[in-house]
Image (tube, rainbow, N blue to C red):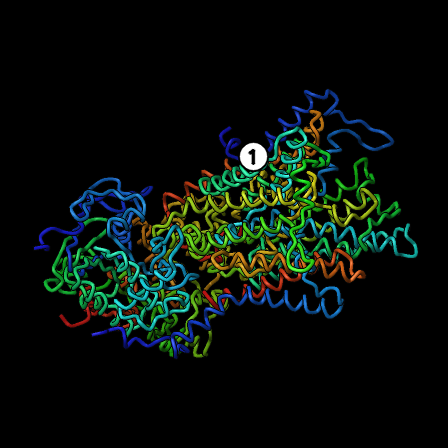
Amino acid sequence: MNKIVPVVQMDDIEIGFPGVKALDRVSFRLFQGEVHALMGENGAGKSTLIKALTGVYSIDAGTIVVLGESKRFSTPAESQAAGISTVYQEVNLCPNLSVEENILLGREPRRRGSIDWRGVRARGKEVLAQLHLEHVDPGSLLSEHSIAIQQLIAIARSVEVNAKVLILDEPTSSLDAGEVAQLFDVIRELRDRGVAILFVSHFLEQVYEISDRMTVLRNGCLVGEFMTRDLSRISLISKMMGKEMDVLAELDQAPVRIKSTSNASVVPFIETEGLGRKGSVSKVNLSIYPGEVVGLAGLLGAGRTEIARLLFGADKSDQGSIKIKGKPQKLRSPRSAIDANIGFCSEDRKEEGLIGDLTVRDNLVLAMQASKGWARRIPRRVQDQLVDEFITTLDIRPANPDALIRNLSGGNQQKVLLARWLVTNPELLILDEPTRGIDIGAKTQIQKLVAKLASKGMAVLFVSSEIDEVLRVSDRVAVIKDREMVAEVINDDISEHDVMAVIAGGPE
Amino acid sequence: MSPLSTLTPPLKKSSAIGYGRLRGGARYAPTLATLGLFLAMFAVGAGMYPSFLSGQVLLNLFIDNTFLTVLAVGMTFVILTGGIDLSVGAVVALSMMVCASLLQAGWNPSMVIPLVILIGGGLGTLMGLVIQYFDIQPFIVTLAGMFLARGLCYVISLDSIPVTDPFFTSMAQARIPLAGDLFISPGVLIAVAVVAVAFFILHHTRFGRTVYALGGNEHSAMLMGLNVKGTKVAVYAVSGLCSAVAGLLFSFYSLSGYSLAAQGMELDAIAAVVIGGTLLTGGTGYVLGSVVGVLVLGIVQTFIAYDGTLSSWWTKIVIGGLLLVFILLQRLFSRKTY
Amino acid sequence: MKSLLKNRLTWPLVALLALLALNQVFRADFLALRMQDGHLYGSLIDILRNGAPTVLIALGMTLVVATRGIDLSVGAIVAIAGAISCSYIASSSDPSSLATAGTAAAIAVVAGLALGVWNGFLVSVIGVQPIIATLVLMTAGRGVAQLVTGGQIVSVSNDHYKSIGAGYAFTLPISILITAAVFVLAAVLTRRTALGTLIEAVGINPVASRLAGIRARNIIWIVYVFSALCAAIAGLMISSNVTAADANNAGLYIEMDAILAVVIGGTSLAGGRYSLVGTVIGAFIIQTLTTTVYTLGIPPEVTLVFKALVVLSVCLLQAPAARNALRRFRPAPKLPAKEKVAI
């Protein structure tokens, strides 16, 4: 009977940030005793919805009803007082404090104004025992424990307040299989006790294993609410990506790109074996030949960016090996990757690409200048030559080398960043979402450019969330799922549907 | 059914309790190292100069450093949150000047003392508010506070003002006898009281634990629903209050007010806190550690005074060297922990 | 007009001119310059000359701040440089010769460079936060200076040495010429090479800079060495001006003035774009403020109160912009601790 009234009911929620509508009239219901998965690609509005519910963001419009009471949260404390607890991906606890303190911080039992440390210990033990964590010493520092245990301690904190709603935001992203199983046992136990659990994860298989129902979001809008058992993996994916399967099937035409068949190189430019990094990705076996475009396909958050970063030394790998032109090589830093003639355009243009307050010229020659060192400044004449050349060939607008790059449109910023690497003449260019958020004209230009670069002998790794785009530009496609590389297909007459079937994890 | 009992315990954790105890010890390691250093210095001193090994030498460390102790207490609060307060030396001087000038004007100490404390706390609160609500770095705000307080000293008077108030002189001269012919000054009692209160606040109140949480991870503390804003302002208020109390203690000690007094004392306070084992990045440290830090600074001075051949500037060099060693240790320590 | 208002040098310049005008109102001969024995005299020259050490140190500080760092040790380096050169002169066999003065200055400058290498080592190699790394030398440095001078104020009588801080050449005080030379050196060093661009890149976006392959370690090391070099030259100037090394008081709080000058000059303490010209203007604003306080008949020590007000108002002016950018868009920046602004 409790199932009739939702514990949380959010209706027509709207949240906007400067220039973006993060949530557009999204409604959401969460019932007692269910595990509810919130699905969507990165940027679909999952985190925003969670943050609206936890009081980190305040909503611009809409209503939130928790346990029958209309609420408007403006701080996390208010949300917590209403019985909502959240466990975030990057364990939001204090590493410098003890386990018991982290469970009870802000709610320590007190006796005459003074914290009752015996009470804290007793309560801490009690709560840990409820989660079968008897072996964790409540007095030990949080930082001594593995991420898995820290997650569970964060859950213990919400158990302690008798939370009615438990939000788990990507709780499994840095856990191994065994640890995930333990976590799921706890989740099921809490569910059976009547806690409403909201589960967010990029791991499709985990969602199918643990959730009862799911809500799918796309581009800040609600797609729908489904029973997990009624929704096949492939239809979930198509709902997340916004493409109906029959439509996709119709679109299944011959890829536009003309493959470079003259590829006679025997030695790949780069070859990885079992490459991985703990808590990030694993089992990456990838080789890219000169003159070849390899696409990385997979859902957002599946581990594509992580692979790109490993290949550029932006993150250090701790498993497997990399060979460059047949010789084993360690890529410890971007610097060492650049010295091996690799270039990398990050998916996060603003935070990891642009030097916003510098000019187009400075940004364009930055990687080349960095390679030469500070003392050997690229002469102004050469700079002008390079900048003019790329402004013309890439059609960068405004064609003003002295404009600050932050004032350019996204597409033009992306072209400058591409040019930054092209001037260094790399043998491998890694492009992570090079066409995200830019207009269709610039997008086509960039796709054409990639094909042209490959035909001139450059190896390209092309990462994109748009599978049709990956298929259009790539010779081969590596499919990533749940942080592992699961397949590699030659792109002769495969369709978007085939790739999605691989992602969904079975022949459909 | 206990699903988690199979969870593999982390390495080395053969006995949870034993391990916990060991780690508990490791948590105090920096402070214990400082204490060890202090004892070693005391032992070396005793070995070199027979008169060093007396209770009074030890007590004098407290008597001569009451104000620095109180300052270090306030600074500990600020540094635990990951902030810094450069204004403390100047606020000490301002407190002394306000005190001396009002007493000279015939005010009663029972009026002057609360007023001085109010000014110190008020200045601290003001700086805390600017830091929190305008989001300006503590370094710059407290630097402005330092300029302001020091400037106000000069506005009050450019010259030294003697304090002749009977209450103050009696506080300066009073000796509280202990066992044997040992004695302490009333200032020591006040400093000990401040330390005790601070210890209680930091370890036995929710405010104190929030200070630690803030230094551990401000964002987490916010998400955990703790009062981050209020706490951040409050630590600067506490530091301001401590500076005022330190100013009063310094007045008892020196019986004057002088604009140039306590120059650079903020550095001594920061050094004492760091040497006492508090991480400058916040979140880890103990107020008792800071007291030991003050004692180490004190014994360095005593040492140099006893030696006779060593000049006073060695104090600074040694303090700088100790600071370096402890910062490098912290660097090593924090790399391992997080 | 709009671009003039937007230019970040406009407001500091307006402030400087307003201060000068205020002085002119109170003292009619304030702006007057006169020639005497082939030397230029006047209040403006005094401001330039008295402000020279602060300008020097602020120039070095500007580059440090642009990389998101800070150098608290410059005051101590001033004391050490003065102590070393004066002690050398006082103990030399020919304390009044040009060679002695030259050697003394050279040794002091080399010592300054060494201290800069030390600071840079702690920050860029060991990875200590700049404020803490330079705090070590700030604390120990004055002790070292006293060690060198033996705790005395070491007076020297060497006309050549004296001319560094008090001499004249081409009708102008030599200290002004030295400062101008260092300014030119800094400008050439940063703009004729790629150093300036790389410093700004590292300060604006350390993550993107790393991904572009910039070796931040070398860049950061260089700015601390340059900062220490400037401080050492300022130390020579200050000690030469009074023909004595005062290990306790030489350059006391000059680091604060220098940081203030940098901030007033429009370089944000959060790093990034810097302006050497702005810093020079900022330093002269501080010096003129001191002079103004004199002119108005207020005790000079009270200048500190005005400085406090200036710092606060400059910071408050800069704050809302920074706040708007940070706050609404990303209430919870997920920067790892080491990438926070190191202050």
Residue at the farthest right position: C94
Q: Nearer the viewer, residue B21 or B194?
A: B194
SS for dot 1? helix
Residue at the front extreme, as displayed: B180
Question: Which one is nearer the viewer's eye here, B9 or C135?
Answer: B9
Q: Is residue A492 left or right of residue C292?
A: left
> Badge 1 sits on which subunit?
B
Could you say where residue C172 lies in the image, as x and y percent from the top left? 79, 36
Characterize the local packing of mark 1: few (<14), some (14-19) or many (20 or more) Cα atoms within 10 angstroms.
Answer: some
Which amino acid, mark 1? Leu
Q: How many marks?
A: 1
Task: Give coordinates of residue C289: x percent, y percent.
Answer: 66, 32
Can see residue A268? no
Say whether residue A214 is left or right of residue C72.
left
Q: Which residue is mark 1?
A: B115
Query: Which image quadrant is residue B151 in?
Result: top right
Q: C78 or C246, which is in the foreground?
A: C246
Q: Indicate the quadrant containing the N terminus of chain B: top left, top right, bottom left or bottom right.
A: bottom left
x and y percent of residue B90 in the render?
A: 62, 42
